[in-house]
Image (cartoon, rainbow, N blue to C red):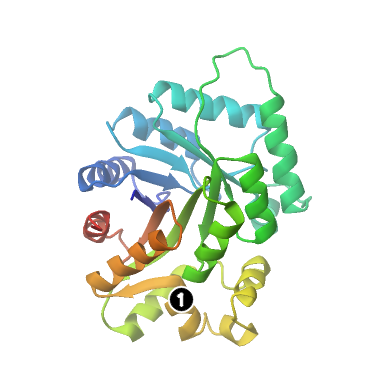
Amino acid sequence: MPIATLYGTDRMARDELLTFARDLEAAGIESLWLPEVLGRDPFTVAGYLLAHTTTLQIATGIANVYARDPAAMVAGASTLAEFSNGRFQLGLGVSNAYINKARGNPVWQPPTARIESYVEAMRALRLTAPQITYPLFLAAPGPAMLATARKYADGANTYLMTLEHTRQARDILGPSPALNVAMFCLAETDPILAREIARKAIAPYINLEYYHRVWRSLGFNDRDFESGGSDALIDATVAHGDLATVKQRVNDQFRVGATRVVVIPLASEGNPDVDLLAAVANTG
């Protein structure tokens, strides 16, 4: 049962980032997933980390299809997979209209159609460099994108969703495609403090309509999206409590269909909780 982690590393200094990656490797974490927002280029960071680690896999979580054309995406992913002896994984997604406008891409296309045409263009390329295979995953919050991931990729990535969503996602994907479930985790036994930390962490997402649509389908309503998120929404999407409780929440994701749990570690001081990751990696 592979345990990965996703962490926004843009504010880490270079040496701090490398230490973090090596600590993950020593802790038994399978892979580090690098988001792409408006900071460092994730492919460049992946190359640096792959060159300075031994077993840790590096993935994009996610690389934005609006940020580079299909040829650049294939070339980058294939080169990283080749030079790392297969330790690179490619996660793709559309991000959101606000981020893409900030990147200078004001035209927003329907996400499913955009991803399908993009992956088809990737597959149609005939580049001169050797093409090395690598796992391809699609960010898939809703049923339409999950169906696209089943058809066009090796699996799907979900983010900030509930246990029931994982169960439903596995039903849509079927038994074979990978299901990578990204989940915020926090070892904090004070529920009031834990929810306060969680609300700060999910603040960038709480007002996004495409999250609302999926959360509504899971039984939440507009009141759950107010004031940073209701206790019920926080408790369903963020694993918090003592270490045993957090580990159980991770194991529950595997039980209902996750292939990999991508832990997003939270801590009261804001630094990544490597001890939590090490403990969760030993989920047996």
Q: Is residue 259 left or right of residue 68?
A: left
Amino acid tagged 1: Ala
Q: Is residue 284 above or below residue 185?
A: above
Q: Is residue 279 visible?
A: yes
Secondary structure at badge 1 equals helix
- Quarter where residue 30 is shown: top left
In this rendered view, identify the residue nearer to me: 124 or 173: 173
- Quarter where residue 206 is shown: bottom right
Residue at (60%, 60%) from the top-left corner? 141
According to the picture, the residue beneath numbered tag 1 turns out to be: 236
Residue 64 screen position, x and y as percent: 61, 45
Residue at (50%, 31%) from the top-left corner? 134
| Label 1: few (<14), some (14–19) or many (≥20) C-alpha neighbours in 10 Å | some
In this rendered view, identify the residue nearer to me: 118 or 153: 153
Residue at (64%, 16%) from the top-left corner? 127
Quadrant including the C terminus: bottom left
Q: Is residue 62 above or below residue 207?
A: above
Q: Give the residue furthest to the front.
A: 175
Residue at (51%, 22%) from the top-left corner? 132
Residue 45 screen position, x and y as percent: 42, 37
Q: Is residue 128 above or below residue 249?
A: above
In this rendered view, identify the residue nearer to me: 105 or 80: 80
Residue 280 screen position, x and y as percent: 26, 59
Q: Is residue 199 visible?
A: no
Residue 205 screen position, x and y as percent: 56, 67
Question: How many numbered tags mark residues here?
Answer: 1
Q: Is residue 245 above or below residue 169?
A: below
